[in-house]
Image: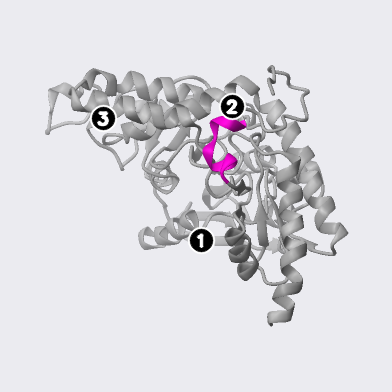
Amino acid sequence: MRVHRCEDAVNLSGYQRDQFPAVTERTYLMTASAGAPPVQGAERLKEYAERWLRADWEAFGPPTMQRVGDKIAAFIGAEADTISFHTNSTLACAVAMSCLEPTPQRNKIVFTEGCFTSQAYLCMQQERIGAEVAIVPLRDGIGPDMDELFSAIDDHTLFVPVSHVFFRNGYVLDAEAVCRRAHEVGAYVILDVYQSAGVLPVRCEKWRVDFAIGGCAKWLCGGSGTGFLYVSPDLAKQWVPKLTGAMAHARVADFDVHSFEPTTGALRFQNGGYYMAGLFACEPGLDIIGSLGIGAIRANSLRMTDRLIAGAKARGFRLSTPEDPEKRGGAVSMVIPGDQTLADALRKENIYVDFRTGAGIRVSPHFYNTDADVDRFFDAVDALLPLMTTTA
């Protein structure tokens, strides 16, 4: 099926499905865990290998990083030359945090229970250099009480690392409101967009996001090693991360070990080298997403998650994901008897979903999926549940 770019499209019906082997070979509904890569990604890896063997180092320079970074910037509402690449989003977050350090007057780090565990652990370790960590709980296990979150962000707060979309249940946080509150008290927001970039609109510049972290391995249909960091252009002119390296020097080729002069733009936050193979592999996925447009992808995602919610409610499964489309990302989590055991049984039936503690079975279709994939998931659940009950 050929789909032209149309921000009002709502049924992509397996767009370029034949280009995604993971989707054609199985019922693949776990993009929130790992997005299916297109065949063109493997072709680009072959190109990378050939250039590597020929020592074609010019193909591996900063221009490639900036080209790929600018494509990502367009998906998160950011300017060009604002994206640096890191092995994963945790290291990207560490680079951001290294720009400032706690003081006796401003040493608080506020995050919610909805953030990814790597970021939580990184925040906790900042206590070793004088930080105080405040964790805002989730209301009914879904999202935080915004008044409680805003109250926690006070005059002592330095960083507010929060997820735009919660990984366990797809809850969408009002990132713009969080940025507004943080800036009122002089704090800085580190927005994790790993679960939103590529499936719903992100507007870093409009929301006045200070830092954003993410990666290409999920909704952007890339691979591993492509964590990224966005820094607001205004702040990028002021800040120099302590976690730095040769790539961040204004004159890399000088190899000056006596002084450090930070460069400008995204390279200022780059530190060492980047995973070039990952940049080659992730670009085709970015191009496919760009051909569709985030608006069309979001509309289709809401339609498919509506179908998942309807199926779950018809069977009496408790939802961990908000029904409100404004508060729902690309995944639907539902509590089904068996949970992890059921997820394992589904995989034996060649149906790939995942399980997240505290949220249940997580199902995350993308533009390459069809309604038939969703129906096949529910048909398998209907067939497996009585067997599991009998076995128990």
Image coordinates of residue 113 in percent, x first then y, are 61, 60
Image coordinates of residue 80 in percent, x first then y, are 48, 19
The numbered mark, 3 or 2, whose residue comes first in the sequence reads: 3
Circle nearer the viewer, 1 or 3? 3
Residue tagged by mark 3? 247
Identify which residue is drawn at 66% across, 56% down. 362
Residue tagged by mark 2? 289
The numbered mark, 1 or 3, whose residue comes first in the sequence reads: 1
Image coordinates of residue 119 in percent, x first then y, are 48, 53
Give the magenta range.
Answer: 17-25
**Circle 1 — which element?**
strand
> Where the C terminus falls, by quadrant?
bottom right
Q: CA distance from mark 1 to mark 3?
A: 32 Å
**Circle 3 — which element?**
helix
**Circle 2 — which element?**
helix
Identify which residue is drawn at 37% across, 35% down. 278
Query: Please, is residue 388 above or below residue 352 in the view?
Result: below
Q: CA distance from mark 3 to mark 2?
A: 29 Å
Q: CA distance from mark 1 to mark 2?
A: 37 Å
Residue type at the position of mark 1: Val
Predominant SS of the magenta segment: helix
Circle nearer the viewer, 1 or 2? 2
The numbered mark, 1 or 2, whose residue comes first in the sequence reads: 1
Residue type at the position of mark 2: Ile
> In the image, which disc is placed on residue 133?
1
Total numbered labels: 3
Q: Nearer the viewer, residue 97 or 169?
A: 169
Identify which residue is drawn at 18% across, 22% down. 54
